[in-house]
Amino acid sequence: MTAIATPTAAPRALNRGVRMAGIGIAAIVIYTIVLWLALTGYTGLPVEAALPVAVQQTVNALSIGAIYALIALGYTMVYGIIELINFAHGDIFMLGAFLTVVFTGGVLGQTGAVRDVIPLILIVGGALLVTMPIIGLLNVAIERTVYRPLRNAPRLAPLITAIGVSFILQNVAIILAGTGDRAAPQVFPLDWQIPLGGARISVLSLFIFVVALSLMIALQQFVSRSRLGRAMRATAQDREASALMGVDLNQTIALTFLLGGMLAAAAGVVWGLRFGFVRFDLGFNSGLKAFTAAVLGGIGNITGAAIGGFVIGFIENFASALNFSRWSEFLVFMVLTFVLIFKPTGILGQATGDRA
Amino acid sequence: MKLTKVGAFAATGVFVFAACTTGGGGTTPAPAASGGGGASAGAGGGDKGTLKIAIELPFQGADKAASDPIKNGVRLAIKQAGGVAGGWTIVNTDADVYDDALNGAHDPQTGANNMTKIVSDADVVGVVGPLNSGVARAQIPISNEAGLLQCSPANTGTDLTKPPDSAKYRPAGKPNNYIRVVTTDDIQGPAASQYDYETLGKKSVYIIDDTEAFGKPVADNFEKDFKSRGGNVVKHDAAPKTTQDYVSIMTAAKALNPESIYFGGVTATGGARILLAAQQVGLGDVPFIGPDGINDGNGGTKDSFLNLGGAAAKNAYSTLAGPGTFDQKTKFDADYKTEYGIDATGYAGQGFACTQVILDAIGRAAPADKASAREAIRAAGTATDHTYKLIVGDVTFDANGDTSQHIVSIYSFDQSGAGGKGDWKFDTQVDYTTK
């Protein structure tokens, strides 16, 4: 398990990767079967009709889970390195979603589905390439101007400040875009579906999952292999000691915010593709659930945040699939409560000592 | 929040200004005969002084699309009356327009604060609003206590005017001050159900509501009626407006193969998002029916259901809890278009009608001075024996403020409307008056 603070040996990485993939696939299959049984038992669907629905819902869960996981990574990395719960992170995601609308709809002038593969890749890839650095740098700028002066202040000060930044970002969005829903261009054709038995698997859902997974693996590799990643892990372990060893603290923390912002921006890009709307308060609820995901996975732990995101996605999807949508948030927080009662450090978290 | 403060500040300023002018008017005899002149508002059309009609609606986010036509309707009515009633000059300035939206959606607490400000302005003798029944529940106790005539152009919450619930909202036990020109959700829901089951011929429905004070009851009323007709309600789910993933919810709905979908709620609480998700999972050809909360303007109206839904709205239907056609509709639409350059949508006519009620009450009460004006106008406005000749037809109000007109109109989507942007097209109306 790659806790951000645990040095890893490169040769073992592949083995671990294979094991993680195995566990992941097993979890997906188990979820599908559980949902299949639940659908048959509860909604009264015939057994053969319930299976395709269960498969489709599993893909839906992976898709929303991937979005939560991408946002959760930003929470967990920032917490890991400066022990700040960055409440403005959800709003960074929201701005990413808005910027995508501006880029795809405004600059490129695309509003409908693009059915040719090459232009589609260029548009979505372009949106990622434009949005991620801009939002990442915005996150760095916020750190530089707002959080850095408070780095050695009592822990409550940056926490409250982060809530303040969240309100500022929301109000910026209100000023620029108003308070209503804004249509996001769904350039990815929604009717691209792969028939699988009776189920129709949305290509977009798979695309979102693959993009998110690639970014997570890239992050994982960056943090565990690169020199800057090593500096991040060192800083997370002991800020003073790593500074004494020549790690540039400011640079390392800025890098953490950059990566977190970039991942949130990527989540914003795929959000618009899937749900077709953005709104100024989008970041609040998404952020809350992503934060929950980070806590569930063990805050400070990168793999944990990713797993937590998918777990939240599965729980929410389970409620929706059984027509219990009104209870989905209740279920999410109930699971969180139970995990924290029985394993206060989260699924993969380690004893955090004086952090909390 | 900030806007409300600015509004309050402006309102105070206008109040002081109005007080000064009234003082001046007292010493200078006004030349015009009572009710004559027809001069523009504020120019001294009435010789007794100036009274105000306040507007209390949400003016942010998706709610704004529904509120703007009402505001226009109110102002058109005042203008057509020459800004005069009962010998008084009647005005509605921008300072008399209160916004109960907070963070982009209507908010009962903000509405209650607004009502407190409105009743403290002694010049206000009538208020048109609010839009949402949830806000009305917070406001009526305050306006009732102050004895201020309140007319809602859009509240359909059944409990507001039906005992014993209605007594809860009048805790001071003062005489009724609240009337409405639209009918109630125990009629709006069933009317949609009747249309779905009988006219569209759909025998099964999937219902989803937004868990809110308006959305859930109207959906419940729909469900009850649909079942009583022998229809099959495949599921009644609910998703609060904070829901992220509507696609999973609609995937679950698709699995149940409904022939139609009913949404209980408003655009601001997810109407268009659910429509888009339904389209995405392959329910795009299934009729999507909603209450007046999604009948909030055409495809060109910012933040409206049709604007956000786009092409996905092709099978959408909506209801309005009032007549969709009435004798003076053509004239009203033409006047409205001349005045504002846009088509009258949603509850514009009801905003006009509410203002007619208040103006008529002022005219009959013809208060001699400001001190007695508010109570006299309230008593005249809520009189149960008076038949109002309103733009939407002749109506009376019962002792609880409910209109005698129990008509629900049904609208369907028309892509050619609003210059190709798509608009709601009046389809039919159901009269439940005898019920």
Image (cartoon, coloured by chain):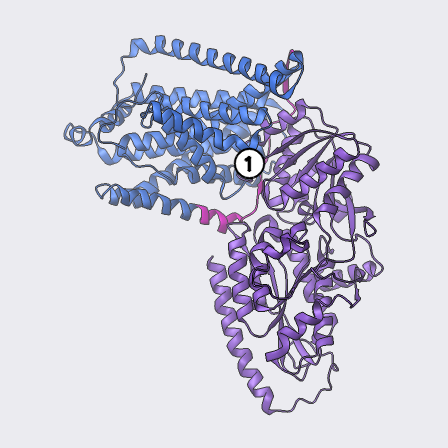
Chain colours: A blue, B purple
Residue depicted at x 83% and y 51%: B434
> Could you tell me residue A122's position as x and y percent?
54, 27
Which of the 4 image quarters holds residue B125? Answer: bottom right
For the question of whether residue A127 can be seen, the reply is: no
Q: Is residue A239 left or right of residue B214?
A: left
Q: Quadrant of the C terminus of chain A?
A: top left
Which of the 4 image quarters holds residue B226? Answer: top right
Residues rendered magenta in the picture: A170-197
Task: Kindly give the residue lying farthest to the right in the view shown.
Answer: B327
For the question of whether residue B297 can be seen, the reply is: yes
What is the three-letter code of the residue carrying label 1? Thr
Front residue of B101 and A94: B101
Residue depicted at x 62% and y 16%: A40
> Could you tell me residue B8's position as x and y percent?
49, 66
**Magenta run includes residue A185:** yes
Above or below — where is A217 with respect to B126?
Answer: above
Residue depicted at x 25% and y 28%: A236
Above or below — where is A36 with respect to A318?
Answer: above
Above or below — where is B111 with respect to A281?
Answer: below
**Magenta run includes residue A12:** no
Which of the 4 image quarters holds residue B192? Answer: top right
Q: Is residue B423 left or right of residue B65?
A: right
Return the residue at label 1.
A104
